[in-house]
Amino acid sequence: MLYAEPLTDTLTVVDNNITYKKQLFKIPTTLTGADDEGYTNYDSSTTYNEGDYAVVPDLHRLYRCTADNTTGVFPLSDASVWVDYGFINDYKMFAEDEQIGDLTTGSDMVLVYDFSRLDTIALIDVTFNSLEIKLTDNTTSTDTIYTIKGEDIGCLSYSEYFYSNPSKVTRVIKNNLEWLPDSTLTLTFTGTVKIGNVIVGNTENLGCTLYGTSLKFEDKSKIANDEFTGYRKVLRKGQIRILEAKIIFNTTEFNVTAQKISRIMGKNTLFIPTNRDRYTEMTNIAYIEEFELPVENPTIIETSATLIGVQKK
């Protein structure tokens, strides 16, 4: 069971001597190619009416006004007047809150990261024509380049090649990039691009994943019934991905493993159960609901972990 603890950033804005903060996954130093929704920035001198939108640029968040003749009310200061609509398009892919998994859209997008002392990049729920991952060692000015196609045309026979539809690549995980003291990572996408989440960090190992590990999907949508007409509609709430992982590791690693669990407990973490391609769908941005460390064997600890993750639909 591999995992990468995502690096995070915190955006802040100050209004009337009050500091407001939003935490998100680490943002790149530069980002181009994302669609611009065209919303205007909040202006304290502007009068807003119900249904008007405004962006707080320091937080890259969008807010919708719910009252007419609203002037001078900062969007984060009064939830009864302004509804938080989440990050604007270019920052949706870095959301770590309830907006996690919402898609950033664009074309020919380029993301540039300060990648010093890191070894993992993960793209979840992603669509593209092609992707170039370039790791630059700034000390020696040398590049290591990986090229990935947006469709997997791997096949075992000529029949599959000619008659089977190629599968779309929806997850890209590179957790074996060279750890360098001073490096830059450049992600260059071509074509129409959609990204649910992009995560950078370092990969750690919790132990060997055993057979018996399972992935379960739960639909948290609800049926709403109109009291008078009886009309029913589905309220989409997204899917819950529950990963029940069976893990084994040496008893001598008890303390180290306990420290790892303590550090990531309650945090959104990227879990990678296996590096076999056929199990990529078990990759999960999740939090640990339960992790027990039973000492019943002098050499081996066998346990299970319940990981809860959300996948937007």
Image (cartoon, rainbow, N blue to C red):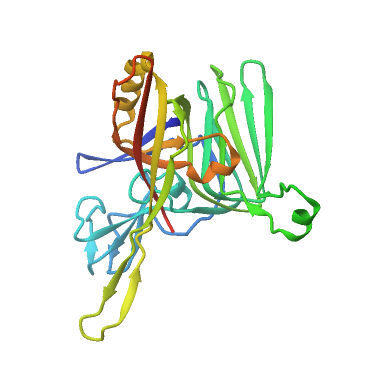
Say which quarter of the image contains residue 247: top left
Drawn side of residue 233 relative to residue 157, left or right: left
* Residue 29 in the image, given as x and y percentages of width and height: 51, 34
Compare residues 73 and 189 and report the one nearer the observer: 189
Q: Which residue is situated farthest in the front direction here?
A: 297
* Image position of 44 (left or right of 39): left
- Relative to 159, is 189 above or below? above
Q: Residue at x 44, y 25 (%)?
A: 207
Which residue occupies the extreme bottom position in the image? 229
- Along the viewing direction, whichever of 28 and 310 lies nearer the viewer: 310
Relative to 188, 119 lies left or right: left
- Estimate the x, y position of residue 250 in percent, counting from the top left: 40, 18
Q: x, y percentage for residue 163?
A: 75, 60
Q: Residue at x 28, y 54 (%)?
A: 44
Quadrant of the frame with the N terminus: top left
Asked whether 183 or 226 is in front, the reply is 226
Which image quarter is the C terminus in?
Answer: bottom left
